[in-house]
Image: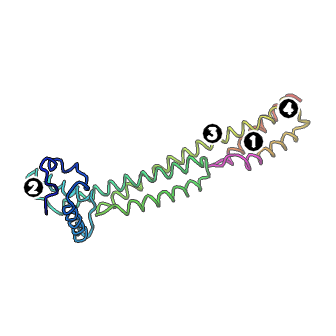
Amino acid sequence: MIRPLTNEDQLQNLADMDLSKLRPEFVDQIGQLRRKVINRIKPKSINGRKLNGEMLFNLAESYVDAINKGAVPSIESSWSYICKNECLRASQDAYEIFLKELDTNFQESAPMPEEELKSIYKSAKKNTLDKFNKVAVGDVREEYLCQLKEKMSDKLDWYKNENINQTEQQCYMFLNANYESIEHKLRNQEYKCLDDLSHEIKDFEQFYLDQGPKGPCYREIGLEFCYKSLAEGSDYFNKTV
C-alpha cells in the first residue's frame, strides 16, 4: 500500500486526520482491503456456535489468563468459560425484561383478579425465556434456566402478596367512603325499621360488587364488611328505638 500522506509531520497525527485529507489512492486501497476482509473472513466458531464480539473477547481473555498462569490454553475449558459468561448475561438481561414488563402491567392495573395477574406473569415469562434461549449456550444453560425460572416464581409470589395488600387497602377505602351516607342516616334515625336498614345495606353490597375494586377475595371482603355493618347497625337501631 502506498503512504497515506507525504508530509512527515502529518503522518504523526494520522489517526486524527480526515479521509478527505489523505491521498485518494490510499483511501481507495483501504476500501478494497476492507471489502476483501468483510467478504472473505469467516466467523470464529466453537462447537458449531458462531462467536460474537463479546464471546471472542472472553475466549481471548481465557487464553491469556491460562498463559499467565503457566498453563496450556484449552479450547474445552475456554468454551465452558464462554458458556458460563453468556448464560449469566442472558439470565440477567432476560430477568430485567421480566421485571420491567411485569412491573409496568402491575402498576397500571393493580389491584387485579388473580387470574389477570397470572396472565400478565405468563406473558412476561414467555418473553423472558425467549430472550434467554436466544443467547444462552452450552451444557450449563439448563442450570441457569432453572435459576431464572426460580427467580421469576419467587417474584410472582411477591406480586401476589402485594396484590392482596392493595386489594384490601382499596376495598376498605371504597367501602368506608361509600358507607358514610348509610351511617349518617342511621345516626339521625332516618330508618323507620330494621328492614329498611337491611335492604339498603343489601343494595350497598351489590353496588360494591359492581363498582368496587377487583382483586383477590374482594367479594369476601365486601360481604364481611356488610355483615358486620348490619350487625352493628342492628345493635344501634335497637338501642335508639
Residue type at the position of mark 1: Cys
Q: Which residue is mark 3?
A: 169
Looking at the rendered structure, the secondary structure element under dot 1 is: helix
Q: Earlier in the sequence, mark 2 or mark 4?
A: 2
Which secondary structure, mark 2? loop
In this view, the mark in front (1 or 3): 3
How many residues crowd around disc 2 within 10 Å: few (fewer than 14), some, or many (20 or more)?
few
Coordinates of residue 85 in the picture (x, y in percent): 28, 55
Are the two marked residues, 4 and 3, in contact with CB atoms closer than 8 angstroms?
no
In front of the other: label 4 or label 1?
A: 1
Dominant secondary-structure state across the stretch colored magenta? helix
| C-alpha separation, residue under disc 2 versus residue under disc 1 | 77 Å
Tag on residue 71? 2
4 or 3: mark nearer the eye: 3
Question: Which residue carries the number 4 mark?
Answer: 238
Of the two numbered discs 2 and 3 in the rendering, the one whose residue sits closer to the viewer: 2
Q: Where is residue 144? Give x, y as percent.
A: 34, 57
Q: Which residues are magenta?
A: 206-220
Q: Amino acid at mark 3?
A: Gln
